[in-house]
């Protein structure tokens, strides 16, 4: 798979089979992803990869909290600005309409939307998950470094025939994850990432992208 195919075929998959993901594959991907760029090569990412019993335990703890109606954990970072301005608000709204529309869920059916969203905390059935942390003392440039690392991981997973789904939603249950992985106190959970082989029977709608001229300006004198 060439890099263009990896980029264009990568998407947030929300349905996985239980097919085992070999540890050697994950090690190969993460060893190569270590070459992701970072300012002054400080490599600010901290990744915990869970499979088997530990992942099942994280899912169980999150599921029990959902069933009990426990509130989300106190946020450790702001996932979105309080009021998204245009065109970002419209893009977010369109994503929600496409995502839930593919499941036959209307905009008004909040209960069904919440039920569908709860699948996040089962990792959509994936047999492997990565939880990515960053030191709470790091600044915006280092958070950008972590984003580049995660994108590299996802593209390498595609090269291995695997799919993924990055999930900031796991930050809402960061205490449950910490109870299993025991990260140092100075780390913040940025996101989880479900990893596995796609369940092709699950319906999905691939969200579009803004036209090039909305996001890119060529300044070339012509």
Image: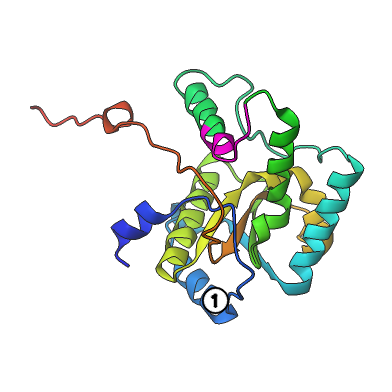
Q: Quadrant of the C terminus?
A: top left
Residue 105 inside the magenta-drawn segment: yes
Q: Residue at x 78, y 72 (%)?
A: 53
Which percent across, then down, holds residue 147?
50, 49
Which residue is most to the left? 222
Q: Nearer the viewer, residue 29 or 128?
A: 128
Which residue is most to the right? 68
Residue 157 inside the magenta-drawn segment: no
Which percent across, then down, holds residue 192?
64, 54
Q: Which picture quadrant has residue 219?
A: top left
Q: Quadrant of the N terminus?
A: bottom left
Q: Residue at x 59, y 40 (%)?
A: 103
Q: Which picture quadrant has residue 111?
A: top right
Instruction: Please tell me how many numbered marks the rendered image carries.
Output: 1
* Residue 36 shown left or right of residue 14 in the figure: left
Q: Residue at x 49, y 76 (%)?
A: 28
Decide: few, some or many residues near mark 1? Use Cα within 10 Å; few <14, some 14-19, many ≥20. few
Which percent across, then down, holds residue 182?
80, 63
Residue 175 can be seen, yes or no: yes
* Residue 192 shown left or right of residue 200 in the figure: right
Above/below status of 186 relative to 52: above
* Residue 164 shown left or right of residue 126 in the figure: left
Disc 1 element: helix
Report which residue position mark 1 lands on: 27
Q: Which residues are magenta?
A: 98-106
Residue 182 can be seen, yes or no: no
Q: Nearer the viewer, residue 18 or 92?
A: 18
Q: Report the colour scheme.
A: rainbow
Q: Residue at x 46, y 54 (%)?
A: 151
């Amino acid at each position: 798979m060439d890099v263009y195919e990896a980029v264009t075929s990568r998407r947030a998959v929300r349905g996985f089979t239980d097919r085992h993901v070999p540890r050697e594959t994950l090690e190969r991907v993460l060893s190569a992803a270590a070459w992701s760029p970072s300012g002054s090569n400080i490599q600010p990412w901290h990744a915990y990869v869970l499979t088997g019993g530990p992942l099942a335990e994280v899912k169980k703890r999150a599921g029990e909290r959902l069933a009990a109606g426990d509130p989300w954990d106190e946020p450790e970072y702001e996932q979105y600005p309080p009021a998204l301005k245009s065109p970002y608000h419209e893009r977010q709204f369109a994503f929600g309409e496409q995502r839930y529309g593919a499941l036959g869920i209307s905009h008004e059916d909040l209960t069904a939307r919440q039920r569908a969203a709860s699948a996040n905390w089962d990792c959509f059935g994936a047999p492997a998950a990565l939880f990515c942390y960053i030191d709470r003392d790091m600044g915006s440039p280092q958070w950008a470094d972590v984003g580049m690392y995660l994108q590299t991981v996802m593209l390498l997973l595609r090269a291995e025939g695997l799919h993924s789904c990055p999930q900031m939603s796991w930050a809402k249950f960061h205490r449950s994850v910490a109870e299993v992985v025991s990260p140092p106190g100075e780390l913040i959970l940025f996101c989880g990432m479900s990893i596995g082989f796609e369940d092709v029977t699950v319906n999905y709608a691939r969200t579009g992208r803004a036209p090039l001229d909305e996001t890119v300006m060529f300044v070339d004198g012509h």
